[in-house]
Each structure stands twice: as structure tokens, then as C-alpha cells.
Image (cartoon, helix red, strand yellow):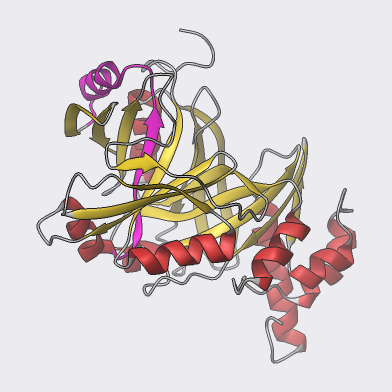
Amino acid sequence: MTPTESPLGRLGLDHVRLVVTDLDAATRWLADGYGLAVHARDAGRTRAVRSVGLGSGSIRLVLSQPLDADTPQAAFVGRHGDGVADIAFRVDDAGAAFGLAVSRGARPVAEPTYRGGVTTAAVAGVGDLVHTFVERPPELDARTLPDLVPAPPAAVGRGLATLDHVAICVPPGRIRAATEFYRNVLGFGLIFTERLAVGSQGMTTEVVQSPSREVTLTLIEPDASLRRSHVDAFVEDHGGAGVQHLAFSTDDIVRTVGDIASRGIRFMGTPDSYYDGLPSRLTPARHSEAELRRHRILVDQDHEGQLFQIFARSVHPRNTLFLEVIERLGARGFGSGNIKALYRAAEAERAGSPEATR
């Protein structure tokens, strides 16, 4: 086993599957707003579920709408609403990866099956999240799945390049079990851990990453002894553990966010006092303070560099799933400094103005 392999072999990120109640509306949201191009169409092998594939750079998302009430997809949206149901891993041998994962304690969801040139198998992850192992021969188009066939992608593009990380919220007391699952069953490494208390709220974050570094999962647990936080709200509104947000990377966040915002995507507001206090925290290495303020982009740094990030407002009826845009200039953290800075800025804004955000 090489340093870039897990015990399951070479494990990379294949795709992320969202189950939705309105496929056409969800496709428009991602294509028109974020510039993800439709690059795979439904293969027509089932009438129970309709799917489409979208992508940008190395990002590959699959949207699936259940058409039959007696399907796992229908059960998922019934419990959680629209959301991420599957983080799928690319492997050399789906059957072997499945067998080893189950022998290490994973709960089997789907036995190895060959269809459409692709072999897949699936195990249960955190909450109702599923992890599908995908094996396809090298000569087969990477967009091919049992339910999808490649289609010529439309040239859209908003500068989104990779799936930087996936944030998963878990109920109080469950983060250690979640972390150990990814470490012991899938061979991920624990690369970051932090206990963060801000005001009367708190959370614990543990980040696990595949040896290939293609898959990074940020696990977040609320502190039950403190005041209810947005993490508590997600777990309650989602109906248990699940994916809170997907973070897409870009090499120019100012350009990308400006383009996305012009297409109607709304981002979370940030108090002006956050930018007023920026000089005392750090000096942005790339974008100017004026550019960051204009687009309400956040900036943080660690010992390896800086990162810029912004969170889109959720369009989910339950106000759960949302998207993040992030640009890294060497930094390997996840913006925890921004949580503290935003809290201080919001408190200062409330003290001096009736409006907390612009």
C-alpha cells in the first residue's frame, strides 16, 4: 500500500449525488447560477428515478429525482428534503473495496453490481448518507454511471474547479464515532481537530481526508451544554446527521463570486465592522480589502497561507443544505478564525447600530 492509498486501494472522489424533488429546478439552480454544465443524461434504464449529471472542472454532481414512492430516493427526501444522499468513491475494485469495508464494520447497502460498463457497490456512512464504490475501466468516460450516459457539456463555467470539502453535521456525542468510521473502515486520516467556543455557542470540528487527498470531510458536532447553534438547527431541521454544505474551489474568488452573484445567487451578509477590523487581523495576500468588502468575502490565515471564502444563502425549504465558494493561497484550514471574527463583528455592529449586517 502506497502513501496515497487507503486499505481499500486507491480511493478518489467520483461524484456527489443529491436527491431532489424537482430535477429541472435543481438543474437550473446549479447550471444557471453556478455555471455547472450538464454533462450526462439519464440512461433510461429505470422509470423509478430520473437523473442528470453536472460538472465544472473536476466537480461531478449527480441529481436524482424519485418518480416512484417506493424507492430509497423517495424515502430520503421524505425524511430530509432535498440533500446529499451519496458521496461516491472511485476505486480500482468495487467488489474488493466493498468486501473489506464490510469486514471492517461498514453496513452493506448494495452488493457489487455490474451495469452499463460500471461496477458499483455501496455501504452506509454517517446518518442516512451512503458511500458508493465506483469501478469503471480506464477506457470508459468518467461521466458514465449505471444511470447516466455522457452528453456534450454546454460551455458555461463560473470558475469553479474542484470540490474542496464536504461539511457533515452530526448530533451531540456522535463525532467520535463518525471520525472513527472514516479512519478505521475507509482508511482516512485525521488532519485537523478543533474545539471552538464563540460567545454562548460551541462546536467541535474534526476533519478527515483520504490518503489521495481527493476526499476531505469536515465533521461538525454542536456542544449540547451551550446555547443552540446553527449546527443544532441543521441536525434538527435535516432530521439527523447529514451534509450541511459543499465547498467548491476557485482560483479567483472575486471574479467567480461577482459572476455568480450577477446570475441571481444570494450570499450571506457580513457586517461592515468585520472589514473595519481586518487590518488588525491580517493583510490580504491577494485581493484588496475594498474588493472583499464589496463582495462580502471572508479571509482567514493559518501557518501555511490564506484562504478566502463565502457562503451562499440556502435555497432549501428547510434552510439546511447550502454551498460555499473558497480560494486557497496555501492555507489548509477551514476558516475557523472567521467564525470568531464574525462573532466579534456582529456584536460590535449590534452595539453601535440597529442593523447587524448590510
Q: Position of residue 335 (x, y in %)?
A: 66, 51
Residue farthest along the top direction in this orientation: 1
Left or right: residue 263 compared with residue 80: right
Q: Nearer the viewer, residue 34 or 179?
A: 34
Residue at (69% x, 77% y) in the render: 347
Q: How many marks?
A: 0
Q: Quadrant of the C terminus?
A: bottom right
Q: Quadrant of residue 6?
A: top left
Residue at (35% x, 61% y) in the render: 235
Q: Position of residue 20 (x, y in %)?
A: 32, 62
Residue farthest along the bottom direction in this orientation: 354
Q: Quadrant of residue 144?
A: top left
- Residues in magenta? 81-106
Q: Is residue 308 above or below residue 229?
A: above
Residue at (27% x, 16% y) in the render: 96
Q: Quadrant of the N terminus?
A: top left
Q: Residue 95 magenta-drawn?
A: yes
